[in-house]
C-alpha cells in the first residue's frame, strides 16, 4: 500500500515538474527574447535592452513595442533577435510596412534571402511611395539573378524619387549583369552629372563598364576616382535606428550622418547635447563648429574653434575649420575689415599645413582666399599644390583653370581643363569651361566636340546649347575671333 502511494506521488511529482518545465519554456518562447549573455555588451546598451524589454513585457500584444525592441537589437547588431521581434510585430499588425521592411533587412543580414524577399515584397506593397523599400527589393532580386523583377523594382524607386541615386545605381548594375555595358555607362555618366552621393561607388561601376567597352584609360580614371568607396544608402527608416545606439562614438556618427543627409538642425541638436555630456571631447566641438558654419552661425563657430586652438595649438583640424569659418565671415555683406578676417583665415590655414602638410584642402582654401584678394598667380600655385598633394581631387585643378580663364590665359586654362576632363569624364562644368577656352584659342572643331560631349552629359543645360549655337555660327562665318597670342591671350 505504502509503495503504491509513493508510486502515485512520484508520478504526480514528475507531472508537476514536466508541467513547470513546459510552462517555463512556453513563457520564455512567448516573452521578449534576450541575448545569451550580457557580460560583453556595453553597459549603456544593456540598460536600453532591459528598459525596452521591460516596457514590452507589460503588454506582449503591442506590435509597436515589439518593433521598438527589434530596432534596439538591430541597431546593436543582434540580427537574429531583431528578426524575431520584427516577425512578432508584423504578425500582430500585418499592415505595418516598417515591421516588414526591417524584417527584410534583418533576414538579409542573416543570409536568409528567400525570407528577406518575401518580407521586402510585403513592405514595398504597403509602403508604395517609400523608394528604399523598392530599391532594397531590387537588390535582393538582383542577387538571385531575377533581373527583370529587379529592373522593375529599381525603376519604381526612380519614379518615386528620381534624386535618390540608389535606384539608378541598381539599374546600372542590372545592365552590367546583362552585359549591356553601353547602357550602364550612359546611366552612370548621367547620374554623375548631378548626384552628390555615392560618387565613388558610381565611378567604380562606371570603371567596370568602361573596361568592358575597351575604354581602358577612362576605366583607370574612373577606378582611381572611386577609391574603392562602398555604396552609402539614403534610407530614413534605417537612419532612425541610430536613435537606438547609445554611447559616445555611435552618437557622434549619428549626428554627422544626419548633417550629411541634410538634417542639419537635428544633427546640431545632437552635437550640442554631446558637448554638454562630453565637454572634454575636442572632436565634438570641432564637428559642432563645422555644423554652425553650415548653418551660418559663423561667430559661434569661430568662438568654439578659437577655444580649441588656444588649448591645443597642434590640432590641424581645428586650425583648418577656423580658417574656413574666418574665410566665410570675410565674404559677408557689410562686414567690417574683411581683409583682417582673410588674414586670420590665411594664418590658420597655414598652421593646419604646418601640422599636416598633406592636407590638400588647406592649400585649396588658401587659393580661394588669395582669389578674394585678387592675387591670382599665387592662388593658381596653391590650387596646383593642392592637386599635387591629392591627385584624385581634380576640383582643385579645375579651380586653377577657372582662374586662368578669368585672367584670359586661355592656353593655360585649356591645359588644366583638358587634364580635368580626362580624369573626370562626367564633369559637365569642366567640359563647358574647356569649350569656351578652345573657342578663344580658335580651336573651333575641338570646341564643338567638347560642347557636344557636355550636351550628352546634360541635355537640358541652356549654357551648353548657347555655346554650341555660337560655335557653329563662328565656324560658318569662319568667325570674327582674334588670333590668340603666344601666351594664350587674345592680341
Image (cartoon, rainbow, N blue to C red):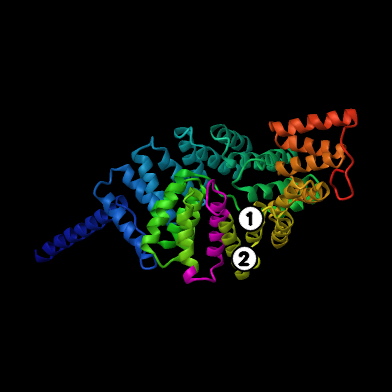
Contact, mark 1 vs mark 2 (Cβ under 8 Å):
no
Residue at coordinates 25% horizontally, 58% vertically from top-left? 21
Horizontal and vertical percent position of residue 443: 87, 40
Percent position of residue 228, x then y = 65, 56
Q: Which mark is residue 120?
A: none
Secondary structure under the numbered disc 2 in the rendered image: helix
Q: Nearer the viewer, residue 470 or 332?
A: 332
Count the numbered circles shown: 2
Query: Could you say which disc has been placed on residue 369 in the image?
Result: 1
Query: In the image, which residues are magenta?
Result: 310-338
**Position above or below: 458 against 5:** above
Chief secondary structure of the magenta portion: helix
Identify the image quadrant of the N terminus.
bottom left
Residue 219 x/y as whole percent: 76, 50
Q: Residue at x 54, y 57 (%)?
A: 326
Q: Give the CA separation, mark 1 to mark 2.
A: 12 Å
Q: Is residue 336 magenta?
A: yes
Outermost residue on the front side: it is 337
- Residue 368, by quadrant, is bottom right
Horizontal placement of 251 versus 223: left or right?
Answer: left
Q: Is residue 110 visible?
A: no
Question: Residue 230 or 336: which is nearer the viewer?
Answer: 336
Q: Is residue 224 magenta?
A: no
Furthest residue in direction left, as rendered: 1
Residue found at x 86% / y 50%: 487
Position of residue 352 relative to residue 228, above or below, is below
**Residue depicted at 36% across the width and 68% down the height:** 39
Q: Which residue is mark 2?
A: 350
User: Between 191 and 138, which is closer to the camera in this rendering?
Assistant: 191
- The secondary structure type at the circle numbered 1 is helix
Q: Is residue 451 left or right of residue 479?
A: left
Amino acid at each position: 500500500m505504502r509503495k503504491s502511494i509513493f508510486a502515485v506521488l512520484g508520478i504526480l511529482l514528475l507531472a508537476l515538474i514536466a508541467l513547470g518545465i513546459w510552462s517555463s519554456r512556453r513563457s520564455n518562447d512567448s516573452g521578449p527574447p534576450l541575448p545569451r549573455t550580457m557580460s560583453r555588451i556595453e553597459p549603456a546598451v544593456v540598460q536600453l535592452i532591459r528598459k525596452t524589454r521591460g516596457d514590452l513585457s507589460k503588454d506582449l500584444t503591442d506590435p509597436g513595442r515589439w518593433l521598438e525592441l527589434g530596432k534596439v537589437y538591430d541597431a546593436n547588431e543582434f540580427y537574429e533577435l531583431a528578426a524575431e521581434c520584427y516577425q512578432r510585430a508584423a504578425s500582430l499588425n500585418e499592415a505595418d510596412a516598417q515591421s516588414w521592411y526591417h524584417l527584410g533587412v534583418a533576414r538579409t543580414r542573416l543570409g536568409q534571402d528567400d525570407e528577406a524577399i518575401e518580407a521586402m515584397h510585403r513592405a514595398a506593397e504597403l509602403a508604395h511611395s517609400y523608394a528604399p523599400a523598392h530599391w532594397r527589393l531590387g537588390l535582393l532580386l538582383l542577387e538571385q539573378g531575377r533581373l527583370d523583377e529587379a529592373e522593375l523594382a529599381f525603376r519604381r524607386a526612380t519614379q518615386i524619387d528620381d534624386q535618390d541615386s540608389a535606384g539608378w545605381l541598381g539599374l546600372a548594375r542590372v545592365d552590367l549583369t546583362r552585359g549591356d555595358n553601353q547602357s550602364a555607362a550612359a546611366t552612370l555618366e548621367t547620374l554623375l552629372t548631378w548626384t552628390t552621393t555615392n560618387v565613388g561607388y558610381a565611378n567604380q561601376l562606371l570603371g567596370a563598364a568602361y573596361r568592358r567597352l575597351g575604354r581602358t584609360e577612362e576605366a583607370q580614371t574612373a577606378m582611381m576616382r572611386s577609391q574603392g568607396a562602398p555604396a552609402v544608402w539614403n534610407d530614413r527608416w534605417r537612419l532612425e535606428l541610430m536613435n537606438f545606439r547609445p554611447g559616445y562614438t555611435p552618437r557622434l556618427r549619428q549626428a554627422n550622418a544626419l548633417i550629411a543627409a541634410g538634417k542639419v538642425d537635428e544633427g546640431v541638436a545632437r552635437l550640442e547635447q554631446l558637448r554638454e555630456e562630453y565637454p572634454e571631447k575636442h572632436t565634438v566641438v570641432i564637428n559642432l563648429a563645422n555644423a554652425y558654419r553650415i548653418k551660418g552661425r559663423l561667430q559661434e563657430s569661430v568662438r568654439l574653434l578659437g577655444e580649441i586652438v588656444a588649448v591645443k595649438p597642434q590640432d590641424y583640424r581645428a586650425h583648418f575649420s577656423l580658417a574656413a569659418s574666418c574665410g566665410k565671415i570675410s565674404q559677408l555683406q557689410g562686414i567690417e575689415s574683411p581683409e583682417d578676417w582673410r588674414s586670420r583665415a590665411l594664418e590658420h590655414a597655414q598652421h593646419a599645413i604646418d601640422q599636416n602638410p598633406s592636407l590638400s584642402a588647406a592649400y585649396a582654401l588658401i587659393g580661394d582666399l588669395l582669389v578674394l584678394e585678387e592675387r591670382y598667380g599665387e592662388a593658381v600655385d596653391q590650387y596646383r599644390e593642392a592637386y599635387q598633394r591629392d591627385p584624385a581631387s581634380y576640383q582643385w585643378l579645375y579651380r586653377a583653370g577657372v582662374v586662368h580663364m578669368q585672367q584670359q590665359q586661355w592656353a593655360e586654362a585649356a591645359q588644366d581643363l583638358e587634364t580635368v576632363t580626362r580624369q573626370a569624364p562626367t564633369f559637365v562644368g569642366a567640359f563647358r569651361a574647356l569649350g569656351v577656352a578652345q573657342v578663344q584659342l580658335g580651336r573651333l572643331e575641338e570646341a564643338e566636340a567638347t560642347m557636344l560631349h557636355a550636351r550628352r552629359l546634360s541635355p537640358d543645360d541652356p549654357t551648353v546649347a548657347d555655346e554650341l549655337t555660337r560655335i557653329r555660327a563662328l565656324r560658318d562665318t569662319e568667325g570674327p575671333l582674334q588670333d590668340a597670342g603666344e601666351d594664350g591671350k587674345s592680341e
